[in-house]
Amino acid sequence: MIKLDGVKDGGRIAVAMSGGVDSSVAAALMIEAGYDVVGITLQLYDHGQMINKKGACCAGQDIYDARTVADRLNFPHYVLDYESIFKQSVIDDFADSYLQGETPIPCIRCNQRVKFKDLLTTAQDLGAEALVTGHYVRRLATPEGAQLLRAVDYNRDQSYFLFATTQEQLDYLRFPLGEMEKTETREHARRFGLEVAEKPDSQDICFVPTGGYASVVSKLRPGSLEAGEIVHIDGRVLGQHQGIINYTIGQRRGLGISSQDPLYVIRLEPETHRVIVGPYSALAKTSIFLKEVNWLESSEKFPNDYSCFVKIRSTHQPVPAVVKKLDDSNAEIVFANPEYGVAYGQACVFIEKDRILGGGWISQGI
C-alpha cells in the first residue's frame, strides 16, 4: 500500500486524471491507501470532438474514461474547461515556435503553464493536501524542500518533461508511480478492474493525434507554408521547399533533393525561408545557450562551471557537460564531447546521478 509523505491518513488528495491507465491507477492506489480522493480532468480542446481519435489525450474519449474510473471507484470527478487557456498558452506557442525554425515541446509548456499552475491552484481550492499525477518520476522530501528524481524505470522516465516545475509546485506534487515499471502499473489496473487496463499509451502530441505537425501549424498560421530555397552550407542552391515547418534539425530523409553524399538539415533560416543542409559533421555542437532556465537546485549553489550530465532530447541519453550560469535566466552548456542534431526549442535538462537540478530551453543565442 502506497502512503504519501507529508499527507495525513485519510487526508484529501486531488488526482490529475488524463483518462489513461497511469493516472487511473494513481487514483486507485490513493483510494486503496484510504485517502479522500477527488479527480480533476482538464478539457483542453475540441469540446469532445476528438472522441474517436486514437493516441490523443484530454479530449472526449479520455474524459469519458476518467469519469468511468471515478464512478467505479466511487470518488467525485470534475471536468474543467481549459480550452481557451490551452490554446493561448500551448497551441499558439507551438505554432509560433515552429515558424521561428524551432522544434517545440508542447507537453512541457502544458505542464508548466496549465497543469502544474491552474490545476494545482484548483486542487488547493478543493482543500487537497497534495496533487497526485501519473507521471513516472520520483520525489524525495528533504528539509530544504522536495527534490525531483528520475523514475526507477529509465525507459518510462518523464523527468525531462517536468524540468520547469518550480520548488513550490514540487513541494505540493506527489508521484506514486515513480518506483514502478509500466507492466506493474497495468497489473494494478487489472487488479482494480479498470476498463483502461489495456488502453494504449498516447503516442503523439495531444492536439496533433495524426503526427502531422505542419498541417496543424498551417491551419493556425495561414501563409506559413511559404516556399524557399534548400541551400548547401557551401552556398550552392540545391532545390526548393514548400515551407521550413516541414523540416527539423538533423533530418536526413524527405529533404526533396538528390545528392551523392548523405545530407542533413543543419539549420533553418525563417527570415530568408531557407533550409540549410550539409554533411553530418556540420551538425556538431560543442556548446549551446539556454534561456528561461529553471533552477530546481538554487542557482546560488551553482558555481560558474558546474560539472554534471545533461539531456538535450527526451530520448537522449544523458551526457557529461559543464553548466555555466550566466544569470538567473540564462546559461551556457559546454559538452565534454560534441553533440549532433541539437535543435532550438528543445529542452536541456541538468542531471546529477538521478536528481534533476533544473534545465532550460535551447536558444539560438543570448
Image (cartoon, rainbow, N blue to C red):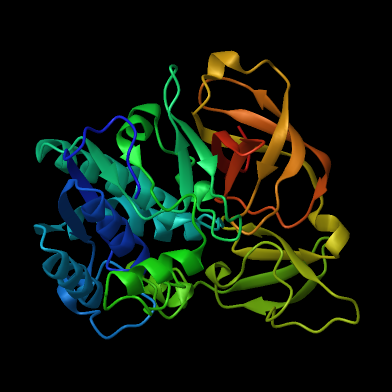
Q: Is residue 165 above or below residue 45?
A: above
Residue depicted at 74% across the width and 74% down the height: 252
Image coordinates of residue 39 in percent, x first then y, are 17, 55
User: Is residue 60 rendered to the left or right of residue 149?
Assistant: left
Q: Is residue 63 above or below residue 154?
A: below
Residue depicted at 57% across the width and 68% down the height: 244
Question: Is residue 343 shown to the viewer in this render?
Answer: yes
Q: Is residue 195 above or below residue 82?
A: below
Nearer to me, 317 or 245: 317
Q: Residue 246 sits in which quadrant?
A: bottom right
Q: How many marks?
A: 0
Nearer to me, 116 or 361: 116
Image coordinates of residue 294 in percent, x first then y, are 49, 31
Residue depicted at 75% across the width and 82% down the height: 257
Residue depicted at 41% across the width and 78% down the height: 200
- Residue that protrudes farthest toward the front in the picture: 1
User: Is residue 359 rendered to the left or right of residue 84?
Assistant: right
Nearer to me, 74 or 78: 74
Question: Is residue 16 shown to the viewer in this render?
Answer: no
Quadrant, the C terminus: top right
User: Is residue 97 rendered to the left or right of residue 193?
Assistant: right
Image coordinates of residue 213 in percent, x first then y, are 46, 72
Image coordinates of residue 139 in percent, x first then y, are 45, 37
